[in-house]
Amino acid sequence: MKVFLFVIGSIFFLASCGDKKTALLNEIKDAENILFEQSKQLKPDETISLELDQALVKALSDFYIQFPKDTHAPECLDKLHMKYSGSGDFKKAAMYGDTLLLKYEYYVNRAMILESLANIHDMNLSPRDTSKVRFYSEMLLKENPDLPLEKVEDINYRLDNINLTIRELIQKRISEE
């Protein structure tokens, strides 16, 4: 709790200095560092500080909203996409992933976001949206002609069997071997 109060205090100090962008970037960095350190020390029955996790989500969102043209804005969307994916809120994860793809066409981790969105729509959202699985998978193939051959084959196999659920696809693959 002392660490959390320190982070909050330092945020207010930096914000009062007038540089909101720097304050938010520092808030994000500090929260990520503290969460990382906490995660290394967790015992099996413990969880990460919900308050700090929510503070990080708020800082990431605030940064993107206040500074959408900054080079760090797409990173914030990427981190929000991953945080919501990791916490099981796949609708929000998809929303942030879509926003990232629409607003930052040349984002360095675009291929990873495309693959993640295809998987979210294939395995995590109900009802399953095969049109979106196809859309993101085909976009991934089109935009990344240098993908490893094995990955291209896996994506094409998935597209050829888009009517099957993941469980059915695995069973089919096993029976083919």
Image: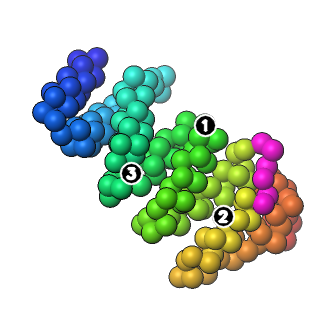
Q: Nearer the viewer, residue 142 or 170?
A: 142
Which residue is pictured at 54% across the width and 40% down the height?
84
The mark that comes first in sequence, 3 or 2, is 3
Q: CA distance from mark 3 to mark 1?
A: 23 Å
Quadrant holding the N terminus: top left
Residue 20 image position (x, y, % from top left):
23, 38
* Rendered view: 107 above or below 77: below
C-beta proximity under 8 Å, tags 3 and 1: no
Q: List the residue tagged with mark 1.
A: 89
Which residue is pictured at 78% across the width and 53% down the height?
129
Q: List the residue tagged with mark 2.
A: 136
* Rendered view: 119 above or below 135: above
Magenta residue span: 126-131
Q: Main secondary structure of the magenta part?
A: loop
* Rendered view: 114 above or below 25: below
Q: Secondary structure at mark 2?
A: helix
Instruction: Give the image quarter of residue 27.
Output: top left
The amino acid marked with disc number 2 is: Tyr
Residue 78 image position (x, y, % from top left):
46, 51
Instruction: Give the image quarter of residue 56.
Output: top left
Tally of numbered discs:
3
Q: Secondary structure at mark 3?
A: loop
Which residue is pictured at 74% across the width and 65% down the height?
134
The mark that comes first in sequence, 3 or 1, is 3
Quadrant holding the C terminus: bottom right
Label 3: how many residues lie within 10 Å, few (<14), some (14-19) or many (20+)?
Answer: some
Q: Tell which tag, 3 or 2, sits nearer the viewer.
A: 3
Q: List the residue tagged with mark 3.
A: 68
Q: CA distance from mark 2 to mark 1?
A: 19 Å
The mark that comes first in sequence, 2 or 1, is 1
Q: Secondary structure at mark 1?
A: loop
